Structure formats: structure tokens, C-alpha cells
Image (cartoon, rainbow, N blue to C red):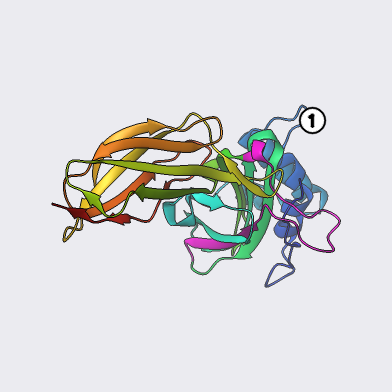
Amino acid sequence: MSRFAAPLRDRRGGGHETARSVTAVRALWRTSPGGGVTSRGAVVGAIAVLLVGAGASADAVADAAQGEPVVSGAVVNSGHDVIVGITHNVVFPVTVSGSDDSGLSFVDVDLKGPHGGFYTTDAFCETATACTTSFTVNAHPAPGSDDPVDLANANAGTWSVDALADANDGDSVFAPGVGSFSLKRAARLTVNASPEPVAKGALITVTGKLVRANWDTYRYAGYAGQAVKLQFRPKGSSTYTTIATVKTSSTGSLRTTVKAVKDGYWRWQFTGTSTTGPAKAPGDYVDVRP
């Protein structure tokens, strides 16, 4: 898996020893030697030691442990799932919110997912309390690239958000697990209702197929064993009603029969799973004749 990693940028208003010290202990913030996240107290202590080593005064050391910025949360993709197919890059925002008496200035954001899924980038803050970064993910080959794909099927599921926020006065704070979101494989549905036209009271056969993006093969493949709703919308209405629920076959195929009652549209609807996004087939119109 590749890492989408924007290069670290220089801090604006340079010359802050604190900013350089935070960079030096970035690795301590994110992981301990055993692989776990370090405690906040250990990080503050590390900053204090670096400040002393840089010749800072006792007052500066005390200031490092006070007035830290606060990260209050992170919103990914405006609160919506991130759904990725096999054709196009998907770009989505992550907004980190927080506060500091001097205002937030910069944020590093890590996204961590199942089976080693990882993305990282950074951004300057657009306001004193909000910092928005932009991530680009894909699951399709990129011609000429040595590492052409970011995602594998095993990466689908719940991801967490870690944020390292800097304030204008040079203070920084690391907030692990400050947010979460679902990264899902895109799904598609087809439908066909026949015969058309059909006599009232006769049987209509409704077929279709549910497929989802395979991030390992860069193709769509049948999604087996999934419950899919058969829905009907009468002519002149804007509302679909669920008529039956059918499970997909081993190849993702769907098939059922219903009685023809009135003119209208038939479709399949899939609500999605923890790893796969929802899908709806376009309505297939059937003319029912007396």
C-alpha cells in the first residue's frame, strides 16, 4: 500500500524554537518504542527537555506545559462515508476543529485503517479554530507508476483520525483517535422487469445483479449472499415501496416474480454493509394492460 503523503511545509513566521522542538519529538508523539501511542505527560516532558537543551529559560519550560491548544474533533467528508470505485480518484476533506488562545495555525492529519491502511497530509488552518486538509485515494492502476494503487480490499471498513495541531504561539498538541469514518467499496445494481407490456394479473419476472468494486483486481465482481430490496413505484407517484427482499446468488444475481397489478417502475435497492456502499438500480417501467 502506498502512502499519500504531502511533504511537510515550512512553518510560517519561522524562528520559533518550540516549532522546531515539536518536529523533533513528532515520532514520540505518534508511537512509543513498543508501537503504542505515548502518553501526553511523556510528550510534554520530552518538549520540556528539548527546550532546556536548546537553552530555554525555566519560564519557557513552564510555558510549554501550559496553554496547550485543544483538538475538539474531526469531520471527514462532511460526515459522509468515503466510497471508492475502480476508475477515478476520490478527493475528500478532513476538517479538524480546536482552539488555542493564540489560534490554531497548522495541522498534520493521519488516517489509519484496517490491515495497515494509512494516509497522511497537512495544511495551514483557514481560521483560528478550524483546519481543513484534503486527501486523495484511489483503487485503480495509474499508468507509469511503480506503486499504482493505494487501496486493497482488506482496507475497507472503519478508519480513525489522528491530528497534530500547532498554535500560532508555537504550542502543539497530538490528539489520537479524534475522529473516525467508513471507507467503503463502491457497489452497483442493475434491473430488468419483463415481459413488457404485460397483462394485468400475469407474472412479472424481475432480475438484476449486485456487484462491488474489487480493489485487488480493479474490476467489479458479484457480491454474494446480500439482502436486496425489490421496490415498486406506481406511475404518477414519486415514492418507492418495498415489495420483497431477495438474497443475491453466488455470482451476485437476483431473480424473483411478482404479480402485475398496475403501471409503474421496478428497481432493486441495496443498503450497503460495513465495507460496501449502498446502491440503487434505475427504475424499469412496465406497462400493465387490462
Main SS, magenta region, reads loop
User: Is residue 207 rendered to the left or right of residue 250?
Assistant: left
Query: Does any portion of residue 200 appear in the rendered image?
Result: yes
> Residue lying furthest bottom in this view?
13
The residue identified by callout 1 is 33
Q: Is residue 268 above or below residue 134?
A: above
Residue at 25% in and 47% down: 232
Q: Position of residue 99 (x, y in %)?
A: 47, 56
Task: Report how many numbered discs are placed on residues in the image.
Answer: 1
Quadrant housing residue 205: top left
Q: Is residue 65 above or below residue 108?
A: above
Q: Amino acid at mark 1?
A: Pro
Q: Position of residue 69 (x, y in %)?
A: 54, 52
Q: Which residues are magenta?
A: 128-155
**Which quadrant of the figure contains the N terminus?**
top right
Q: Check residue 144 for magenta coloring.
A: yes
Between 239 and 190, the one nearer to me in the picture: 190
Crowd band around label 1 with a 10 angstrom C-alpha radius: few (<14), some (14–19), many (20+): few
Quadrant housing residue 229: top left
Q: Position of residue 48 (x, y in %)?
A: 71, 44
Residue at 48% in and 43% down: 209
Residue at 62% in and 37% down: 40
Between 30 and 50, the one nearer to me in the picture: 30
Q: Check residue 260 for magenta coloring.
A: no
Secondary structure state at the residue bearing disc 1: loop
